Amino acid sequence: MARNEARPVVRLRSTAGTGYTYVTRKNRRNDPDRLTVVKYDPIVRQHVPFREDR
């Protein structure tokens, strides 16, 4: 199955400054801007916003 350019792989980096990242895919058509998701950062042991890193 070929990779689709409409759904690229993006890296979500913690805004807490820990350097912790998640890797996910996003639909570029629905979310053309940078993605922001609240997820768990195990280094600070809190839910913090993760922002798309390019």
Image (cartoon, rainbow, N blue to C red):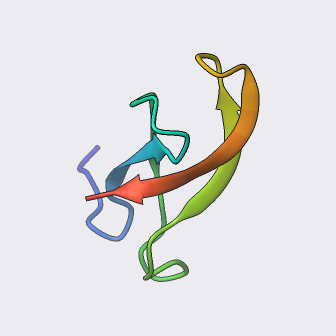
Residue situated in front as seen by the camera: 54 or 5: 54
Who's the residue at 46% across and 29% down the image? 18
Image vertical order of residue 11 relative to residue 45, above or below: below
Who's the residue at 42% across and 57% down the image? 52
The quarter holding residue 21 reads top left
Who's the residue at 49% across and 56% down the image? 51
Along the horizontal axis of the image, is 13 left or right of 38? Answer: left
Residue situated in front as seen by the camera: 15 or 27: 15
Image vertical order of residue 46 relative to residue 31, above or below: above
Residue situated in front as seen by the camera: 25 or 15: 15
Query: What number of labels is visible?
Result: 0
Residue 29: percent from left, percent from top = 46, 82
Image vertical order of residue 2 relative to residue 54, above or below: above
Image vertical order of residue 1 relative to residue 36, above or below: above
Residue 1: percent from left, percent from top = 29, 43
Residue 41: percent from left, percent from top = 63, 27
Q: Quadrant of the C terminus?
A: bottom left
The quarter holding residue 32 reads bottom left
Who's the residue at 23% across and 49% down the image? 2
Residue 9: percent from left, percent from top = 34, 49
Along the horizontal axis of the image, is 4 left or right of 26? Answer: left
Residue, far right:
46
